[in-house]
Image (cartoon, grey):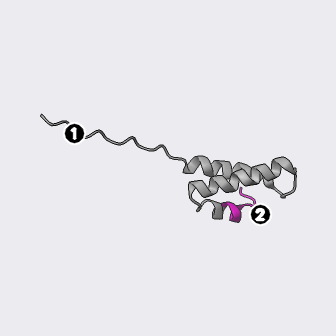
Amino acid sequence: MPSPLTAPLLGFLGRLSFPRLFMVTAALFLIDLVVPDLVPLADELLLGMGTLLLASWKKRKEPLSPPQQR
């Protein structure tokens, strides 16, 4: 069951594009790494944001080679 504190924030973060979500996740991770427990529930937020990052990460398709002419 999602926490009533983190669910709205993760809902907002789920609508961000991959680069912006990555930057927000990296910034929160670095802040939590330097100053532990500065942001309440930071560990839960990082787990949720990591899940969102993996869900939004898609493999890029390789371009098709041009058709060969005879």
Question: What range is drawn magenta here?
Answer: 1-10
| Vertical comparison of 54 with 15: above or below | above
- Describe the element under mark 2 as helix, strand or loop: loop
Quarter of the figure that contains the N terminus: bottom right
Residue 56: where, in percent of width, then height? 55, 51
Task: Check if residue 3 falls in the magenta segment.
Answer: yes
Q: Nearer the viewer, residue 15 or 29?
A: 29
Q: Nearer the viewer, residue 64 or 46?
A: 64
| Vertical comparison of 20 with 68: above or below | below
Location of mark 1 (residue): 67
Residue 22: where, in percent of width, then height? 64, 52
Q: Which residue is depicted at the point 64% across and 61% down?
A: 13
Location of mark 2 (residue): 5
Quarter of the figure that contains the C terminus: top left
Identify the image quadrant of residue 16: bottom right
| Vertical comparison of 15 with 29: above or below | below
- Describe the element under mark 1 as helix, strand or loop: loop
Q: Nearer the viewer, residue 24 or 44?
A: 24
Q: Nearer the viewer, residue 47 or 26?
A: 26
Spatial CA distance of label 2 from label 1 is: 54 Å
Residue 26: where, in percent of width, then height? 70, 50
Point out the tag, 2 or 1, that comes first from the N-terminus.
2
Task: Check if residue 58 falls in the magenta segment.
Answer: no
Q: Which residue is depicted at the point 87% across and 51% down?
A: 35
Q: Which residue is depicted at the point 68% across and 52% down?
A: 49
Question: Looking at numbered disc 2 in the image, what kind of residue is underneath it?
Answer: Leu
